[in-house]
């Protein structure tokens, strides 16, 4: 078996690297852009903020495989190690929340805290992925009929705005077309729900922030019941509340960071070595 | 060290070309009135990369405080002239209370 080199992922970092680090993980078909422009600057006076594009997304390369949550979690850990030696708070939105959760399970020594934003339960539905992979072409043609968990927020943000953002949309379509040539779809669909024991193994302080109208509240409550130190807040809005209600989401994030004990950021305070080490 | 608005626009032009790297961008007219999202049609990650390049290029400019006061909608709606003006403003200047004093 030939070892495949990990792709060098695009990341944007703001604020001094000597500060405590907050790391953002975008959702499926998203990019780091939203997190840099919508959240990072407000945090960067106090924190070192990093947002990166997952493999196959944004300005990162799209290798043929490596799209399972474990691969993404390893990518996230590599990004962390590239930017800091210490533990970090990871903020994961939607599918990015699964990556953040998997990472906290695999690399407990690296996790100072976890913020999960509106992440739906696993497994991902095939029709949601298909609607995303094929839906942008339809939307570009003015057909807003494709519907699914990943295309709906994108679609709503684009309605009435197609012409002005045609190039940006073409970029999204080009990236999705590349992703369709990879094992992305089959590997995403192969990831199964986390067991109760896996959630119980999360050692860091965790905040769940869910939108009031996207649903998934039962899943959120299950996580809250299983993760040792876990809070749940439900904010008014749809799944795109990270855009439409960015102030409220940012306030919840700031509150979490303010309440995080100093010990959480200290490498000595975190549990045993990683079970799944990755090369730097 | 000071920089003129025109020099700052040139720096932004270079950053856009570096990020987009397309013939399209080379042919694009980028002047003070060009907006990042509407005029240049950059998507959010491209705008973020352009800003990151400017941060590295002008470490004394306190972009973080300036952008930190803005919504995402406001940032993507900035013109090249807005950003160049901020870079080129005198070090001790502050405009209308919205522009923080720049560290040396």
Image (cartoon, helix red, strand yellow):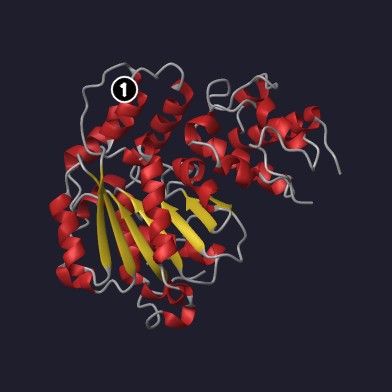
**Which residue occupies the foreground of this view, B95 or B62?**
B95
Tell me the residue that label 1 is attached to. Answer: A139
Query: How many discs mark residues in the rendered view?
Result: 1
Q: Position of residue A255 (x, y in %)?
A: 39, 57
Q: Check the image and report above or below for A133 versus B100.
A: above
**Residue in the image at 37% along x and 81% along y:** A271
Residue at (52%, 55%) from the top-left corner? A49
Q: In this view, does B4 lie above or below A82?
A: above
The residue lying toward the viewer, choosing from A91 and A277, is A91
Image quadrant for the N terminus of chain A?
bottom left
Determine the residue located farthest toward the front in the rendered image. Answer: B97
The chain that hosts pointer 1 is A
Q: Residue furthest toward the left?
A: A218
> In what element is the residue under mark 1?
helix
The residue sitting at 36% across, 52% down in the picture is A252
In the rendered image, residue B83, in percent from the top left (x then y), is placed at 67, 32
Residue A269: which quarter of the image? bottom left
Instruction: Examine the rendering and report whether any part of residue A8 can be seen.
Output: no
Q: Residues within 10 Å of mark 1 (few under 14, many from 20)?
A: many
B68 or A220: which is nearer to us? Answer: B68
Residue B34, how many percent across, how many down? 63, 21
In this view, the residue in front, B47 or A179, is B47
Q: Is residue A51 visible?
A: yes
Horizontal side, residue A213 vs residue A182: left or right: left
Residue sitting at x 68%, y 46%: B62
Residue A80 rendering spot, x and y as whole percentages:
49, 63
The image quadrant that residue B66 belongs to is top right
């Amino acid at each position: 078996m030939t070892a495949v080199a990990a792709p060098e992922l695009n990341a944007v970092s703001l604020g001094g690297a000597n500060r405590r680090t907050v790391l953002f993980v975008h959702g499926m078909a998203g990019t780091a852009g939203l997190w840099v422009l919508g959240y990072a600057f407000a945090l960067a006076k106090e924190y070192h903020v990093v947002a990166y594009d997952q493999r196959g997304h944004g300005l990162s390369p799209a290798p043929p495989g490596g799209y399972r949550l474990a691969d993404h979690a390893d990518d996230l850990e590599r990004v962390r190690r590239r930017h800091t030696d210490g533990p970090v708070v990871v903020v994961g939105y939607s599918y990015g929340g699964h990556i953040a959760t998997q990472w906290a399970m695999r690399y407990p020594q690296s996790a100072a805290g976890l913020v999960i934003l509106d992440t739906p339960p696993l497994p991902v539905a095939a029709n949601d992925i298909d609607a995303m992979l094929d839906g942008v072409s339809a939307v570009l043609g003015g057909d807003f009929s494709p519907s699914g968990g990943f295309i709906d927020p994108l679609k709503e943000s684009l309605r009435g705005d197609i012409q002005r953002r045609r190039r940006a949309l073409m970029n999204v379509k080009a990236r999705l077309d590349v992703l369709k040539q990879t094992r992305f779809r089959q590997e995403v669909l192969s990831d199964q729900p986390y067991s109760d024991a896996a959630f119980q193994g999360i050692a860091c302080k965790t905040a769940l922030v869910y939108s009031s109208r996207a649903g998934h509240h039962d899943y959120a409550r299950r996580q809250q019941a299983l993760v040792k130190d876990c809070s749940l807040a439900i904010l008014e809005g749809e799944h795109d509340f990270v855009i439409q209600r960015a102030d409220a989401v940012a306030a919840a994030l700031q509150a979490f960071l303010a309440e995080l004990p100093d010990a959480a950021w200290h490498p000595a305070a975190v549990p045993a070595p990683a079970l799944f080490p990755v090369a730097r | 060290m000071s920089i003129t608005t025109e020099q700052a626009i040139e720096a932004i032009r270079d950053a856009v070309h570096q990020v987009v790297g397309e013939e399209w961008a080379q042919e694009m007219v980028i002047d003070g009135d060009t907006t990042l999202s509407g005029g240049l049609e950059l998507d959010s990650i491209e705008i973020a990369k352009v800003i990151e390049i400017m941060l590295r290029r002008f470490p004394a400019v306190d972009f973080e405080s300036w952008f930190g006061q803005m919504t995402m909608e406001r940032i993507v709606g900035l013109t090249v002239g807005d950003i160049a003006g901020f870079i080129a403003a005198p070090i001790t200047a502050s405009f209308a209370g919205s522009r923080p004093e720049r560290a040396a």
